[in-house]
Every structure is written in structure tokens, then in C-alpha cells.
Image: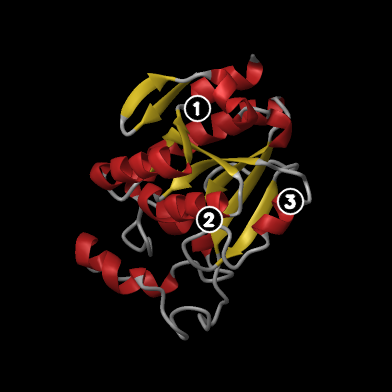
């Protein structure tokens, strides 16, 4: 198996990582692929333009994963419509820190509000897929029922795609590892705030949390 370790692709011993590669105990977690990040308009409340080019590849990967019996979980940020769990409560830190890097975000207060168009999926959700639609902060595990959902299906390995690599993907990878799931991050199907932070996040995953692989390589391993 080929994986990326601190930015360098290396051949790994399959026997050492055999327990990571069982489709029957694996779920794909697709993180925050919704309009609030991906809409191509000046009103987009938390823009992640680098992630727009992975929408179609993620859909294609999910199609192949479903065909192999791998379960798909779509996860998105959704806040109560009055914002009481964020902008009208204790605001998430990113609302003040992220603009220091990207500049002012005029519509940031609308991000992820329940019932708004910003919470609409951009990637395709198939009828048999699962959804977690109450992610309030950076990790897909907090304060959602994701762990309950995975454990009740006896999932042992989670495969992450989506965005941001250096934010919600990385936080989810840390939490998954802390919950004793085996972690795989798909290098070609995640996007970070910028290439530098994306690379740093993937390096951290590869050193401390799990495997960083390309999606085609993972599909090849599942089929073998």
C-alpha cells in the first residue's frame, strides 16, 4: 500500500495496516460539503473556494465506495435558526480569527443557520447514505451523535474527505483517534484554507493520527 508520510509517498507493509482496510468495518465521513462553504457568490458566509474542485471527485469516490459496501456519512454544520448556539451565544472563535487571514466576510453571521440555503448539500447524498446535521463546532464528533451512529454499526475505521483540511477535517481526525477509531484521510479529496496549511495538517495526520492516502489507492486496496 502507498501512503503519504510527512509529505512523502512511501510503500507501507500491508500486514501492518490490514485492520485499516476492511470495507465491512469502514465508514466514509464527508465533512461540510455544503453551500455555506462552496457557493460561488459574494454572499457565501464562510468561503472555501479551493474545495469546489473536489465536489465531482468526491461524488465519484462515494459511488465506488457504495458499490463495495462502504457506508457513507454526510456531515454538515447547522446552527439553530436564531443563532443562540453561536452568534447570539458564545460565538465560535473562527468568526473573529479567520477574517484576520482572508479579510472581512460580509455575510458571516448567516453561516450554517438552520433553514437557510447555506446548509444545502453540494455533494450528492444517495438514499442509503447517512446524515449528521447538527455539527456546531469544528469536530464532526462534537456535539453530534456521530460516535453513537458509528459504534452501533460496529465501525472501526473512518475515512475523511471534505474541508477544511486544517480545520474541521483535522479536528475530526483528532477526535476520531481519541475515540479509538482508525483514521484515514484522503489526500486528493480534502482541501485546506491554503496549500501550506493543507500540507501541514496532512503531515500531522500522517505522524500522529492515521494514514494519508489517495482515493484511488484506497479503492484499489478495498478491491484486493
Residue that label 1 marks: 215
Mark linked to residue 151 = 3
Are dots 2 and 3 in contact, CB under 8 Å? no
Residue drawn at (51%, 18%) of the image: 13
Alpha carbons under labels 2 and 3: distance apart: 14 Å
Alpha carbons under labels 1 and 2: distance apart: 22 Å
Q: How many marks?
A: 3
**Which of 120/141 is in front?**
141
Please indicate, yes or no, whether residue 219 appears anywhere in the rendered image.
no
Where residue 200 sits in the image (x, y, percent)? 29, 44
Q: Left of 133 or right of it: where is 152?
A: right
Alpha carbons under labels 1 and 3: distance apart: 24 Å
Q: In which quarter of the view is residue 191 placed?
A: top left
Residue drawn at (43%, 25%) of the image: 3
Where residue 69 sits in the image (x, y, percent)? 73, 30
Which residue is situated farthest in the right direction here? 152
Q: Left of 191 or right of it: where is 31?
A: right
- Disc 2 crowd rating (10 Å Cα; few below 14, some 14-19, many 20+) is some
First reached walking from the N terminus: tag 1 or tag 2: 2
Q: Secondary structure at mark 2?
A: helix
Q: Left of 184 or right of it: where is 19?
A: right
**Which of 212/216 is in front?**
212
Which one is in front in this view, the residue at disc 1 or the one at disc 3?
3
**Which of 112/198 is in front?**
198
Q: Secondary structure at mark 3?
A: helix
Residue drawn at (55%, 45%) of the image: 30
Quadrant where the C terminus lies?
top right
Q: In which quarter of the view is residue 158 placed?
A: top right
Residue that label 2 marks: 175
- Disc 1 crowd rating (10 Å Cα; few below 14, some 14-19, many 20+) is many
Amino acid at each position: 500500500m502507498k501512503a503519504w508520510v510527512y509529505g512523502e509517498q512511501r510503500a507501507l507493509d500491508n500486514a501492518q495496516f490490514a485492520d485499516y482496510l476492511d470495507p465491512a468495518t469502514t465508514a466514509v465521513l464527508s465533512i461540510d460539503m455544503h453551500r455555506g462553504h462552496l457557493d460561488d457568490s459574494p454572499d457565501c458566509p464562510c468561503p472555501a473556494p479551493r474545495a469546489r474542485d473536489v465536489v465531482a471527485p468526491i461524488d465519484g469516490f462515494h459511488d465506488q465506495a457504495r458499490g463495495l459496501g462502504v457506508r457513507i456519512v454526510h456531515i454538515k454544520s447547522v446552527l439553530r435558526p436564531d443563532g443562540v448556539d453561536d452568534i447570539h451565544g458564545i460565538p465560535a472563535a473562527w468568526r473573529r480569527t479567520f477574517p484576520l487571514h482572508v479579510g472581512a466576510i460580509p455575510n458571516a453571521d448567516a453561516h450554517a443557520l438552520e433553514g437557510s440555503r447555506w446548509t444545502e448539500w453540494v455533494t450528492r447524498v444517495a438514499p442509503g447514505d447517512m446524515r449528521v446535521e447538527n455539527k456546531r463546532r469544528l469536530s464532526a464528533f462534537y456535539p453530534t451523535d456521530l460516535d453513537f451512529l458509528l459504534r452501533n454499526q460496529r465501525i472501526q475505521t473512518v475515512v475523511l474527505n471534505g474541508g477544511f483540511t486544517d480545520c474541521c477535517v483535522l479536528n475530526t481526525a483528532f477526535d476520531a483517534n481519541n475515540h479509538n477509531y482508525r483514521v484515514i484521510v484522503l489526500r486528493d479529496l480534502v482541501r485546506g484554507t491554503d496549500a501550506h496549511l493543507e500540507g501541514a495538517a496532512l503531515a500531522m495526520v500522517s505522524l500522529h493520527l492515521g494514514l494519508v492516502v489517495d482515493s484511488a489507492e484506497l479503492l484499489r486496496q478495498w478491491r484486493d
